[in-house]
Image (cartoon, rainbow, N blue to C red):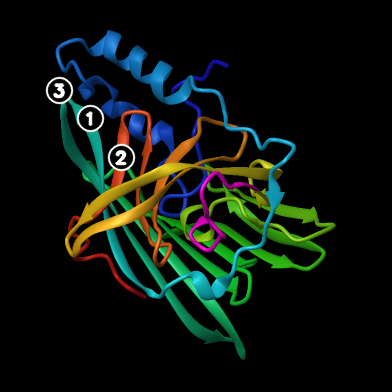
Amino acid sequence: MSWCIGLAFQALRPARPWPYAILAPYAPFIDAPNRIGTTAMMLVTVALGAMSLKAPPSAAQVTPVGARLEEGRSCYVLQIKAADALRPIGRTLQIVRRERVDGRQVIRVIVHQQLQNGAFDVRDDFLLATTDLRPLRYESRSHGKVTVDVTYRADGVSGYRVTKDGDRNALSAALEGPVWEGNLWGAVFAALPLSQDAQLTLPFWHYEKGLGRFAIQVVGEDTVAVSSGDVAAWVVEASDGSGPSVTYRFAKDNGRELAYTMGGFTQTLGGDCAGLPDA
């Protein structure tokens, strides 16, 4: 399978992994800073050339459990491998809280991402059902301006997206069964029943890709060092079928997302998210 730098790999941040088209300018810094062209091509091969993880026939369709998702404010640092060292290039703030909206109890997940060079500043706001994290509404803002607004119903979705030219294009799709939001990965996967060798699948709808299915596999165990000490973690590979798989590490005790890797990029718990608003 071949991929080009212009392909934006959209899916998760701690919500979805960073869109690769935004990270591509950092390609020359990976492994060999003095070999710009060669290194960039190597990065495309490594980060985007991998086959997507596919759900095996035996994979079980599961339902996330909202009670597993812990409230809190988590900061992550985005880094890139450069000359055998990790170089920080951005940050992600993820907020999970339970609140009442229009008389209904919901779980709100906010994911705000920034690159240090200012090229990328996106804030995603998800309203989810408290029981199973099915989406109720999704709004995305780029540099403070709304770019996507989607409302979910039991039988369909509706909303709009704003093009690069500023035009507002309507979004509409019928649904025949439950789906989850295709832009929210980490928080949803954290609420799944992860266990050794688990092979899971979950249907989603994405405003660009339409209907699809996540493939999620627990491929091992690890110990992750965080500020409070070492944490036992599940190692999980996940894909939406349209790009390379992403490797996550989730805490075994409470499901907290600790890190993920994608090609030469990593996102890990830590860093400084001062200045990013909670609201």
Magenta stretch in the rendered image: 189-200
- Identity of the residue drawn at 36% across and 13% down: 41
Labelled disc at residue 81: 1
Which quadrant holds residue 215? Answer: top right
Distance Cα–Cα, label 2 vs label 3: 15 Å
Mark pair 2, 1: CA separation? 8 Å
**Secondary structure under the numbered disc 2 in the rendered image:** strand
Q: Dot 1 lies on which element? A: strand
Asked if marks 2 and 1 touch (Cβ < 8 Å), the reply is yes
Q: Quadrant of the N terminus?
A: top right
Residue 132 is situated, as x and y percent measured from the top left of the image, at 63, 70
In this picture, residue 277 sits left or right of residue 207? left
Closer to us: 138 or 48: 48
Looking at the rendered structure, the number of numbered marks drawn on it comes to: 3
Instruction: Find disc 2 in the rendering and name its residue.
Output: 266
Residue 204 vertical position relative to residue 187 in the rendered view, above or below: above
- Image quarter of residue 270: bottom left
Q: What's the residue type where badge 1 is placed?
A: Lys
On the image, numbered disc 3 is attached to which residue? 83
How far across and down, in percent of the image, does residue 249 sit? Answer: 38, 49
Tell me if 235 is positioned left or right of 61 in this view. left
Position of residue 120 measured from the top left corner of the image (x, y, whole percent): 34, 45
User: Which residue appears at 41% of the width and 25% of the height?
Assistant: 47
Residue 183, position in %: x, y? Answer: 54, 51
**Among all residues in the image, which is located at the extreme bottom?**
103
- In this rendering, would 167 be left or right of 7? right
Who is closer to the viewer here, 187 or 113?
187
Secondary structure beneath label 3: loop
Q: Main secondary structure of the magenta part?
A: loop
Q: Residues within 10 Å of mark 3 (few under 14, many from 20)?
A: few
Query: Closer to the N terminus: mark 2 or mark 3?
Result: 3
Q: CA distance from mark 1 to mark 3?
A: 7 Å
